[in-house]
Amino acid sequence: MSVKVEASHDGIPHNKVMIIGAVISLVSLYIAIIGSILGVDYLAFFGGIAFIGALIWGNSTIKKLCSYGIGTGVPSAGMLAFGSGVIALLFASTLGGINIFIVPVAALVIGLIVGLFLGWIANSVLNMKIPVMTRSLSELAAIGALALMGLGTVATGHVGFTDLASAEILGVTVYNASYIGAGLIAVSFMIGAIALQHPFNACLGPGEKQDRTNMLAVECGFLSMIAMAVISFAFVSLIAAWISLIVAIVGWLVSYVKFVALSKRDAAAWLDAKPFSDQEQ
Amino acid sequence: MSAIAAKPAANAGAFQPIPSVIALVIAIILVVVAYFLGSAGILAGGAMYVLQTICLIILGAALIAFGVHFVPVGGAPAAMGQAPGIATGVAMLATGAGLAGLFGGAWAAASFVGNLPLALGSVAIGGALMMAITCLMVNISYVYGMGIPAASGKVLKDPITGDLQAAYKSQGTEGHGLPFISYVGGVIGGLFGGLGGTLIYVELLNFYNVGLPALGFVGAADINMLAIGLAGIFAIGMFLVIAVLSAYNITGTIEGPHDPKFKRFPRAIIAAILASAVCGLVAMLVVALF
C-alpha cells in the first residue's frame, strides 16, 4: 500500500481519454455489426480497432488505479478486468437474440454494473480506501467486455451469441468447432488481458509519458490482432481474413516503429549495440 | 485528491462490520432472485436446481478466497532474496494453481461422471501437486542458485517443525527462501484453489448441459462441447476475479498460514461470496429464456 508509482500528470486528462476510447470502440463495433447484417464479413477488422480503442481507455484507467500502489502489481488489474469482462460480454451477446444492435451498449452497461459491485467490495469490504477504486474497477470490467467483443469480432465477424457458439462446416452447423466451443475465447482472453496490462507495466516510472504508453497500447493491440486474424481464417471468408491480417501487420509495424522512436526520444542516451562485433570473428 | 496525497489506510487489516453485513444481504438477495428466476421458468432446471447451482458456485468461490491466503507470495522482494515466498504476485500464483486444478477438473469431470467427490478429490490433488512442485523448485533455486537458507521473518520458530528461524535470517531482510510452514501453506492453498475452481466449473457445466438445449441448441455430443467451453471460460473468469480480490485483501505479500495477514481471510470470504453471487447470476443468465 505504501509504494507509490509516479504517473504522468501532463497530457490528455483521463475523462477525455475515456470518452475517446469508448467512442472509438463502440463506433467500430457498430460498423462491424452493420457489415455482418449486410452479409459482408470483410468489415470484421473493425473489431481490432474497437479492441485498440478499449485498450487506450483501459491503459488510462490502469494508470490512474495503479498510481495508488495497490500492492499486487499492475498485471492483476488486467486479469480482473477480463475476468469480470468475459462474464459481462457473454451475457450481453445473448441479448443479441432480441436485437443485435443493443449488444455493444449492453456489454458496456453490464460491465459497468458488475464492475461497480467488485469495486465496492474492494473499497468497502476489503477496506482498500482508494478514492478511484470503485470507478476504476467499474470501468475495467466494461473495458474487458468491449475488448473481448472486439477480438471476437475479428475472429468471427459477429457479436451475437448464436454466431459465437456455432460454426458452419460444409453446410452443417456444429458447436464444438465454434469460437466458444473450441475454447478460442480463452486465447483471446489471455492475449487481451496481457495487452491491457502490459503498456503501463512496461512504461511506468518517473519518466513515463502518456503518448509513449498509448503508442505501446496501440502496438500491443495490433500484435494481439495478428493472432486473432490468423484464427479468423477458420471462421470468416478468405478475403476478410486476409484484410484483417494485413491491417494488423501493417498497423503493428507502423506503431512499433513509432514506439521505438518515442522511446529514443525519452531515453537519456542510447547505443545501437550489435550482438556480435566484427573484431571477434 | 491526487495520487501523491493519498495516505495508505491506517487500519488496513481491520474487519469492516457494516459493509460486510451489507455485502452478505446483497448476496442473499441475489440468491433469492436466482431462485425466483428458476421457479418462473426463465432459468432452466427448476427452482431447487438453480438454487443448488448458485449456492455451490458461492461455496467454490469461498474456497478459492480461503485457499489464496495459504499461498506464500513473495513478489519482487522475494526475487531479490529479501522476503520469504515465491517470487511472483498473488494473481499469477493463484492462476497457476487454479488452472492446473481446472485442467485436471475438466478431465476428471468427464471421466467420473456422476461421482462428484471423486472428481473433486482428484482435482484438489492436481492443484496441490502443482504448488508442491512449484515450491520445491523455488527452494532449489533459492538454496543452490542464490545460496540462501530458508528462514521466516514473521515467527521465531517454525510452527510445525519447531526449527529456529532468527539464526538463519540475514540482517536487513524479512527472511528469505521457503520455510517448511510456507511450503505446507502453498500445498494447502493449491488444494483449496483447485477444489473451488473445479466446483464452479462442474456446477456451471451441468447447468449449461441442462440450459442450452432449452435455448434451441440441439445435438447431444456437440452441446456438451459448447457447455464445456462456456463453463471453462466462466470458471477462469470467476477464479481470476476472486483471486485478485483476495490479493487486494492481502495487499501484496504473505508468508503463509503463520503470517499475521492470514487473519484477514474472513473479509476475503465475504468479498468472494458477494462477487461470486453477482458473477454467478450473470453467468447463469447466459442461458436464460427471455
Image: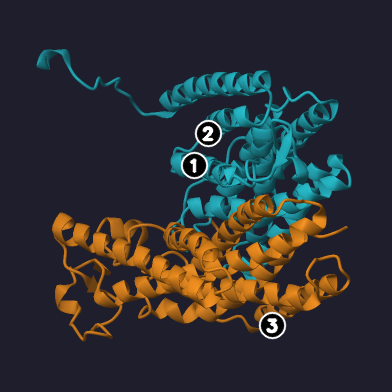
Residue at the spot 52% in from the left edge and 32% down from the top edge: A216
Mark 1: which amino acid? His
Disc number for residue A220: 2
Depth check, mark 3 against mark 2: the one in front is 2
Q: Which residue is mark 1?
A: A198
Check the residue under mark 2 and report the chain it is in: A
The residue type indicated by label 2 comes to: Cys
**Measured from the top left, where is residue B113 in percent x and y?**
57, 68
Q: Are circles 1 and 2 on residues that touch, CB within 8 Å?
A: yes
Q: Nearer the viewer, residue B222 or A66?
A: B222
Chain rendered cyan: A
Residue at 36% in and 70% down: B186
Which residue is situated farthest in the left direction here?
Answer: A280
Identify the image quadrant of residue B93: bottom left
Q: Residues within 10 Å of mark 3 (few under 14, many from 20)?
A: few
Residue beneath disc 3? B21
Drawn side of residue A273 relative to residue A111, left or right: left
